[in-house]
Image (tube, helix red, strand yellow):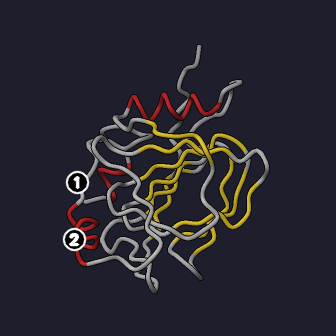
Amino acid sequence: MVRSQAVDAPVQILMLERNGWVPNNPRLPVLIYIKAIAVESADPAALFEKTFSANGWPPQWRYGVYAYHHYHTEGHEVLGIASGYARLMLGGPEGRVLEVSSGDVLLLPAGTGHCNVESSDDFLVVGAYPPGQRADICRQAPSQEQLANIEQLPFPDQDPVQGVHGAVSRYWT
């Protein structure tokens, strides 16, 4: 049996401005949950999947993070680091490098550039999106329509890690 091991982890926020062709999100910060999930099972990805599902974020994939800069305009994305470690660049080329490891969670608002700069061989991520949202892969400057979509994309009902009264309700207003 897999049981969720979500903990009341500290949350850091990171505001990113437009960076060249990467729009980032002008009003919503990246939320960084340090050691949000206690990884204590033979299938740590299942712990993230269970936590995200319980909070209304259906998990969509298990993989890594692409080694090229990209962003999404049709979905807010949560990344749960199930195993290994990585250096991820957020915000586009010449952006902010963030070191992540198993147990960490990143919540990227639509428009946030991200890229895997370096990772361990066992780096594994669980990705999820709010219902009805998806990860279009954008690798060039957004159109006016895409910028409008980023601006108008609905907020999720719940925080993917902390639920109804989590960081999303505090920082995404």
Towards the viewer: 166 or 52: 52
Q: Are marks 2 and 1 in contact (CB under 8 Å)?
A: no
Of circles 2 and 1, the one toward us is 2
- Which quadrant of the view contains residue 88? bottom right
Q: Position of residue 135 (x, y in %)?
A: 41, 54
Towards the viewer: 19 or 17: 19
* Residue highlighted by disc 1: 154
Q: Alpha carbon of mark 2 to alpha carbon of mark 1: how far? A: 12 Å
Task: Judge from the rendering whether residue 145 lies leftward or rightward of residue 138; answer left or right.
Answer: left
- Which quadrant of the view contains residue 112? bottom left
Furthest residue in direction bottom, as rendered: 20
Task: Please state which amino acid type lies under the numbered disc 2.
Answer: Ala
Task: Judge from the rendering whether residue 39 lies leftward or rightward of residue 135; answer left or right.
Answer: right
Residue 54, compared with residue 36, is above or below; it is: above
Task: Judge from the rendering whether residue 169 lies leftward or rightward of residue 23; answer left or right.
Answer: left
Residue 173, compared with residue 78, is above or below; it is: below
* Residue highlighted by disc 2: 148
